[in-house]
Image (spheres, grey):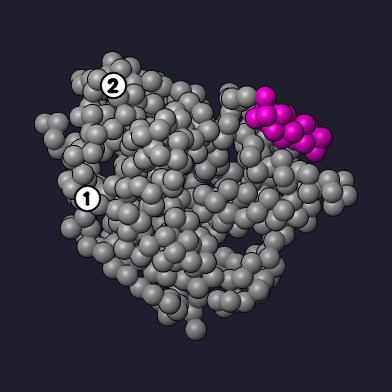
């Protein structure tokens, strides 16, 4: 029996010729990741275990991005703990404010994660890197502590589901819409502890930003990981960035899947996830009665340069609706610089939007965009649970950057097509 791409990567990292779904395996990891919320717990556990050194100072990445720049004393103390640990162990992959970016945009951009890697992170959206053809998944902070010491972690090899996206994408439809549509179909537990393997014509023609976005939200369907087989587009992205040797894996033709689903992309228009679950999806055309107070364009899901270009193309020459605030946050310093160089900042500023230094900030209701009681936001982020961006009685609608920008101008949820 053949193996899936996920099974092949796991087998290679646990020294076996093959692994089968349900098998308990011990894997070597290529990168261990934690942020300013999760790393302090891992550091405490590391010290509690009596460890004196990390397994590899060049394989542990600490990124203070959730409450950075520090929003209060507590967050400053948490970041201080990361900084001191990085100094103590001479970690080469510590990213302070000014170098920092939203972790899941930063690591691919900087070539820290490569195709064929096994990556664990104390953050659920670590599954982002499946867009490069890596096995990446979120784990607990105690697992991160153990991996920082040993360079290994145990897994139960997941079953795989295959998703085939046929046809071509309609205008203003992106990877964000496909993954929202998929979650709307299978539900937030529809891929529980499974690998979501994304394939088909639409994926093959999709750029890296869209692929990373889709894998980023695999966790919103309960998946262990999302993954896309690497190809020429992947090669073009990683070859000038990768700091280590990478390897491309492909699923065998006779690989076994517990479920195979196919979607006709010609029938998909921009999708919006309504409160309070990512599975509560509707086409944007069904929601033009919903007024809004805030728009957030950014996050590890949609804060890349391609996302900012898309939003700028919609909002250019227009103004944000009265009493609506728009917060644009480039995901990394490199994205920030590129957006500034391309004149995107001028477009946003002319429209009366605000621009921030890279941070997760509003996505988790951390800072720089917290919602008050009764307020509604359209966000390009990945979660819209109760209280996710602020008050428990606020509402978050998830969309792609084009819909977010159009909604900012309209003062309600709407499509870019309405602005013509």
Q: Nearer the viewer, residue 176 or 414?
A: 414
Residue drawn at the location 88% of the way across and 49% of the way down: 50
**Position above or below: 386 against 228:** above
Is residue 86 highlighted in magenta?
yes
Relative side of 154 to 368, left or right: right
Q: Secondary structure at mark 1?
A: strand
Q: Please report whichever mark, 2 or 1, sits nearer to the chain's N-terminal start.
A: 1
Disc 2: which residue:
323
**Position above or below: 27 against 178:** below
How far is disc 2 from disc 1 in space, using C-alphas? 25 Å
Residue drawn at the location 72% of the way across and 60% of the way down: 152
Mark closer to the observer (2, 1): 2
Q: Is residue 109 visible?
A: no
Is residue 371 highlighted in magenta?
no
The answer to which image quadrant residue 58 occupies is top right
The answer to which image quadrant residue 247 occupies is bottom right
Q: Is residue 281 visible?
A: yes
Q: Main secondary structure of the magenta part?
A: helix
Kindly give the residue lying farthest to the bottom in the view shown.
1
Label 2: few (<14), some or many (≥20) within 10 Å? few
Q: Secondary structure at mark 2?
A: loop
Residue drawn at the location 30% of the way across and 17% of the way down: 352
**Position above or below: 15 against 47:** below
Q: How many marks?
A: 2
Disc 1: which residue:
283
Query: Which region is colored magenta?
Result: 73-89
Label 1: few (<14), some or many (≥20) within 10 Å? some
Query: Residue 199: image x %, image y %?
Result: 35, 63
**Position above or below: 373 against 171:** above
Query: Residue 248: image x %, image y %?
Result: 50, 60
Query: Residue 282: image x %, image y %?
Result: 25, 52
């Amino acid at each position: 029996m053949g193996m899936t791409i996920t099974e092949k990567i796991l087998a290679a990292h646990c020294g076996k010729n093959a692994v089968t779904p349900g098998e308990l395996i011990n894997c070597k990891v290529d990168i261990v990741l934690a942020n300013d919320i999760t790393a302090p717990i891992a550091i405490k556990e590391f010290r509690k275990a009596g460890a004196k050194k990390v397994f590899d100072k060049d394989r542990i990445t600490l990124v203070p991005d959730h409450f950075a720049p520090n929003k209060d004393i507590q967050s400053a103390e948490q970041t201080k703990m990361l900084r001191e640990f990085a100094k103590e162990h001479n970690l080469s992959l510590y990213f302070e404010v000014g170098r920092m970016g939203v972790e899941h945009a930063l690591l691919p951009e900087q070539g820290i994660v490569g195709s064929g890697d096994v990556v664990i992170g104390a953050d659920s959206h670590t599954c982002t890197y499946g867009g490069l053809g890596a096995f990446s998944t979120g784990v607990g902070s105690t697992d991160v502590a153990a991996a920082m010491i040993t360079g290994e972690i145990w897994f139960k090899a997941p079953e795989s589901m295959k998703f085939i996206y046929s046809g071509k994408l309609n205008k203003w439809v992106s990877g964000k819409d496909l993954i929202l549509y998929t979650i709307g179909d299978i539900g937030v537990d529809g891929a529980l502890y499974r690998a979501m393997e994304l394939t088909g014509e639409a994926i093959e023609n999709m750029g890296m930003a869209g692929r990373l976005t889709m894998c980023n939200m695999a966790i919103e369907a309960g998946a262990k990981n999302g993954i896309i087989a690497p190809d020429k587009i992947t090669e073009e992205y990683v070859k000038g960035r990768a700091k280590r040797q990478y390897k491309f894996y492909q699923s065998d033709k006779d690989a076994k899947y517990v479920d195979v689903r196919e979607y006709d992309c010609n029938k998909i228009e921009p999708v919006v996830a309504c409160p309070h679950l990512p599975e509560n999806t509707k086409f944007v055309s069904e929601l033009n009665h919903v007024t809004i107070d805030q728009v957030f364009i950014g996050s590890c899901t949609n804060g890349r340069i391609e996302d900012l270009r898309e939003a700028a193309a919609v909002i250019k020459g227009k103004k944000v609706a009265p009493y609506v605030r728009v917060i644009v946050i480039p995901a990394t310093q490199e994205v920030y610089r590129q957006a500034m160089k391309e004149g995107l900042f001028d477009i946003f500023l002319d429209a009366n939007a605000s621009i921030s230094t890279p941070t997760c900030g509003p996505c988790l209701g951390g800072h720089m965009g917290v919602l008050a009681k009764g307020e509604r936001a359209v966000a390009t982020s990945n979660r819209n649970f109760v209280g996710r961006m602020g008050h428990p009685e606020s509402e978050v609608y998830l969309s792609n950057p084009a819909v977010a920008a159009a909604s900012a101008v309209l003062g309600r949820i709407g499509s870019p097509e309405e602005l013509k």
